[in-house]
């Protein structure tokens, strides 16, 4: 079934692909948040279900996890669509300069670091460690290294108690008015990225980069299968994942440069220092746990810390309500908090929404992010919780037990159901009258 979106229509859909990807249609504007796992999939899904869609105003990548980012390079290269701008994690400033100028050196450094790490953990039997457990083993190491390098305070500064209203009710628009999507940043781009843009345009083919990625993969497979001290399966899988992460980051930047797209950078580390999110497009789409910066601070980090995704640093965004659209909270994989057990809510630094919201399920409804629901429901009433992606472990027990007006899923591995287009669509009067159309799987898991 195909859908069209006249200017007065508002909707939020989870796309039926592996991984996580959401499409927000808000008046005359369209926002895509993340692109799932599959290359060449997002574009075909959009053409099938949204045949009238040929322009996406904002493409957001919450973080470089493969199930969120891997589908974006091919989408940005798809000439069926035009794009306005791309919003990316500011920490990619630690990756892109070397990865674009010297991909062979970058990959060599990554593999060498793997050997050093293996020596540090030589007393551990890697063959008995699951990949997810190994990622958890490394997560604290990564966080601590990033915090030291950026001189992040142990306790994130708390926001002021008297937060102003996000958008005064008498200034809420109808949802179909013209929005200045470039209101908060000069049009000239960061000098470091302008240099990379020039370099990529002059160097022509990316054959050297593809050879570097291929060589790094071969090196990992060799270490996995060697006779003496073979690399554990979890370690090998993790490092192969880092190679794919690097390839995806480079691919997104390449596509954006080729299409001459404007890129905006949102830095989690800068937010950790101030406790005050900033940037985006006020009244339209704003960061929850990041500061928009033209020149994010470049840190001296290991390859592991540069490439390892941590859920805490996954970017979250909020689209405030209008008279015709509900507020929408994009959670990504974020627990929506930091500190011990993530108890310090990121949402405390945002004013309370003026109506019920639609929220995407944090980390596909994972039980590891159960604290996020406490943060969300303390901040706002939730009309709809929309879930995408995930494994047979998701959704977790907390998601299943939540009480809200509607829980929708685009995929349910636990019930063996294939992905479907899932979402809500409304017209004038929402959120007070609720969504007019509902699609997807109503969560019936217990």
Image (cartoon, rainbow, N blue to C red):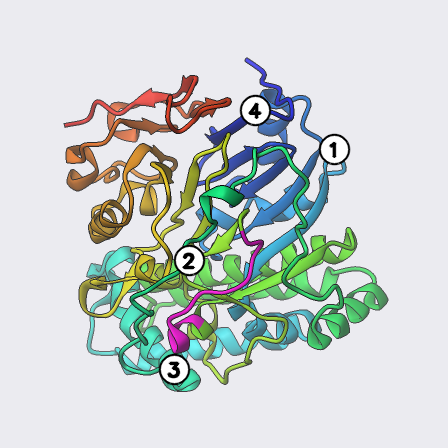
Q: Earlier in the sequence, mark 1 or mark 3?
A: 1
Residue 225 seen by the camera: no
Question: Would you name the residue on which mark 4 appears?
Answer: 9
Q: CA distance from mark 2 to mark 1?
A: 31 Å
**Closer to the eye: label 1 or 3:** 1
Q: CA distance from mark 1 to mark 4?
A: 22 Å
Query: Within 10 Å of the Cα at label 2, are there few (<14), some (14-19), or many (20+) other Cα atoms?
Result: many
Q: Earlier in the sequence, mark 2 or mark 1?
A: 1
The residue range painted magenta reads 271-282
Residue occupying image coordinates x 62% and y 76%? 295
Query: Within 10 Å of the Cα at label 3, are there few (<14), some (14-19), or many (20+) other Cα atoms?
Result: few
| Residue 151 location (% of width, % of height) | 39, 86
Residue 178 seen by the camera: yes
- Whether residues under marks 3 and 2 lie with C-beta atoms below 8 angstroms apart, the answer is no
Question: Would you name the residue on which mark 1 appears?
Answer: 80
| Residue 336 location (% of width, % of height) | 31, 56
Q: Earlier in the sequence, mark 1 or mark 4?
A: 4
Q: Nearer the viewer, residue 408 or 321?
A: 321
Q: Earlier in the sequence, mark 4 or mark 2?
A: 4
Q: Quadrant of residue 46?
A: top right
Question: Would you name the residue on which mark 3 appears?
Answer: 116
Query: Within 10 Å of the Cα at label 1, are there few (<14), some (14-19), or many (20+) other Cα atoms?
Result: few
Query: Which numbered disc covers residue 288?
Result: 2
Q: Quadrant of the C terminus?
A: top left
**Closer to the eye: label 1 or 4:** 4
Residue occupying image coordinates x 34% and y 55%? 334
């Amino acid at each position: 079934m195909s859908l069209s979106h006249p200017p007065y229509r508002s909707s939020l859909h989870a796309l039926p692909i592996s991984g996580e990807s959401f499409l927000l249609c808000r008046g005359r504007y369209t926002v895509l948040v993340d692109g799932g796992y599959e290359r060449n999939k997002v574009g075909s899904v959009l053409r099938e279900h949204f045949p009238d869609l040929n322009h996406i105003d904002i493409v957001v990548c919450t973080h470089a996890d493969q199930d969120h980012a891997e589908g974006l390079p091919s989408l940005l290269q798809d000439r069926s669509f035009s794009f306005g701008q791309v919003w990316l994690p500011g920490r990619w400033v630690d990756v892109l300069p070397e990865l674009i100028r010297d991909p062979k050196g970058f990959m060599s450094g990554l593999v060498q670091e793997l050997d050093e790490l293996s020596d540090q953990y030589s007393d551990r039997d890697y063959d008995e460690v699951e990949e997810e457990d190994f990622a958890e083993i490394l997560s604290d190491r990564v966080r601590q290294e990033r915090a030291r390098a950026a001189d992040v305070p142990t306790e994130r500064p708390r926001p002021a108690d008297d937060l102003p209203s996000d958008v005064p009710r008498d200034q809420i628009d109808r949802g179909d008015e013209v929005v200045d999507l470039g209101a908060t940043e000069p049009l000239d781009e960061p000098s470091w990225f302008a240099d990379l843009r020039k370099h990529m345009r002059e160097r022509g083919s990316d054959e050297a980069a593809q050879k570097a990625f291929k060589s790094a993969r071969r090196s990992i497979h060799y270490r996995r299968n060697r006779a003496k001290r073979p690399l554990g399966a979890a370690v090998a899988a993790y490092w192969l994942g880092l190679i794919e992460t690097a390839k995806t980051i480079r691919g997104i930047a390449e596509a954006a440069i080729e299409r001459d797209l404007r890129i905006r950078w949102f830095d989690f580390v800068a937010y950790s220092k101030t406790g005050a999110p900033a940037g985006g497009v006020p009244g339209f789409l704003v960061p929850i746990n990041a500061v928009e910066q033209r020149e994010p601070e470049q840190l001296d980090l290991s390859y592991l810390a540069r490439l390892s995704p941590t859920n805490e640093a996954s970017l979250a965004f909020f689209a405030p309500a209008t008279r015709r659209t509900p507020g929408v909270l994009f959670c990504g994989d974020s627990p929506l908090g930091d500190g011990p057990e993530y108890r310090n809510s990121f949402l405390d630094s945002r004013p309370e929404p003026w109506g019920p919201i639609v929220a995407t399920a944090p980390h596909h409804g994972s039980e590891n992010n159960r604290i996020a629901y406490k943060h969300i429901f303390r901040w706002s009433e939730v009309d709809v919780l929309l879930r995408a992606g995930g494994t047979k472990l998701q959704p977790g027990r907390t998601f299943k037990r939540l009480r809200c007006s509607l829980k929708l899923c685009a995929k349910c591995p636990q019930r063996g159901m294939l992905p479907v287009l899932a979402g809500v669509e409304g017209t004038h009067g929402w959120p007070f009258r609720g969504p007019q159309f509902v699609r997807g799987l109503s969560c019936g898991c217990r």
